[in-house]
Amino acid sequence: MVDIVEVKNRKQLKEFIYFPFKLYEDNPYWVPPLIMDEYITLDRRKNPAFEYCDAKYWLAYKNGELVGRIAGIQNHAYVKKWGNKYTRFGWIDFIDDTEVSKALLETVEKWAAVQGMEAVHGPLGFCDLDKQGMLV
C-alpha cells in the first residue's frame, strides 16, 4: 500500500527536494538541480509565480520508505488566458512501481477536481519558463 503525505513543514520539504538525489544517484543522465533554486522555487514567499499560482506538494511512502514525490500547481493566469481548466503536475519522481506512480497522479487528479479543474497535464512548472519534462 502507498501512503501519500502532503508536505506541511520544512523537514518534509527537505525530503521532497532531496528525494531525486537518492533515486537517481547512479543514473548518468540525471542532471541535479541547484538545491537553493529548488527551495526558492517551491517557497510561496520567494517565488513570484505564487502571485497567480497555488501549489501543493506530496510525498509517497511504501512500507515506511520514501518512494516518490509530486507537485500539483494551479496556474490561475493560464486558466484565465486560455480558458482551459487544467492543473499542472511537476516534480514527479518515483521508484519503478506502477502502484506508486498511480497513487501520486491520482492525488493530483483528486485535488484538481476539488478545485473545479477538468484535466491534469505535465510535467510542468509554475509557468511556461520553468523546467518541463522528466527523466524516463
Image (spheres, rainbow, N blue to C red):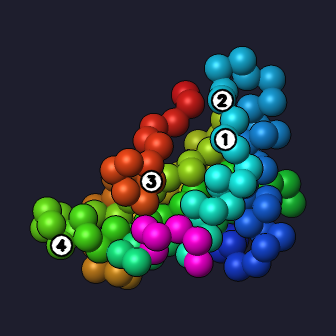
Q: Specify whether 46 is left or right of 50.
A: right
Asked which secondary structure carries label 2, the reply is loop
Q: CA distance from mark 2 to mark 3?
A: 17 Å
Q: Nearer the viewer, residue 86 or 99?
A: 86
Disc sitting over residue 125 in the figure: 3
Q: CA distance from mark 3 to mark 4?
A: 17 Å
Q: CA distance from mark 3 to mark 1?
A: 14 Å
Q: Amino acid at mark 4?
A: Lys
Disc sitting over residue 33 in the figure: 1
94 falls in the magenta region? no
Residue 129 lies, in percent from the top left, at 38, 48
Q: CA distance from mark 1 to mark 2?
A: 7 Å
Q: Residue furthest right?
A: 64
Is the residue under label 2 in contact with that under label 1 (CB below 8 Å)? yes
Residue at position x 79%, y 62% in the image: 14
Identify the residue position indicated by label 2 in the image: 31
Q: Nearer the viewer, residue 108 or 17?
A: 17
Residue 93 lies, in percent from the top left, at 62, 44
Identify the residue position indicated by label 4 in the image: 80
- In the depicted structure, whether residue 106 falls above or below residue 33: below
Q: Earlier in the sequence, mark 3 or mark 4?
A: 4
Asked which secondary structure carries label 4, the reply is helix
